[in-house]
Amino acid sequence: MAELEQAKNQVSDGNANIENTALDLKKGGLIKQASLVGALLFGSRAFTETILVFSSPYGDEHFVSATCQAAITLLCIAYLVFAKNE
């Protein structure tokens, strides 16, 4: 029975960590939320453009856009990680 209680506590602690992360993001404000969305969107676009760079016969046309979008993704992630909550 003690093992079952311990397992329940571990699951509830895991859910609390997810909720704390979501609350921290909400407390971070609109800019921090926008940096998360920007990182996800530009990251997926950079990934797609990178695939086109390597698989398309016109890959050199996608190189600049893939590089720019990857740089924007890194900037958004850096802001998300290093920005302080207000």
Image (spheres, rainbow, N blue to C red):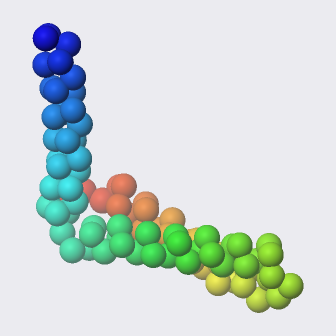
Snapshot quadrant of residue 58: bottom right
**Where residue 59 sits: x, y (%)?**
80, 82
Above or below residue 31? Residue 80 is above
Residue 24 visible in rendering: no
At x 16%, y 41%, the residue is 16
- For this view, does 21 lie left or right of residue 38? left
Snapshot quadrant of residue 76: bottom left
At x 76%, y 77%, the residue is 53
Q: Nearer the viewer, residue 6 or 61?
A: 6
Residue 15 visible in rendering: yes
Q: Residue lying farthest front? A: 1
**Where residue 83 sits: x, y (%)?**
30, 59
Q: Quadrant of the N terminus?
A: top left
**Where residue 61 sits: x, y (%)?**
77, 89
- For this view, does 47 lie left or right of residue 55? left
- For this view, does 25 lie left or right of residue 5? right
- For this view, does 52 lie left or right of residue 46? right
Q: How many marks?
A: 0
**Where residue 4 sits: x, y (%)?**
17, 18
At x 80%, y 73%, the residue is 54
Q: Quadrant of the C terminus?
A: bottom left
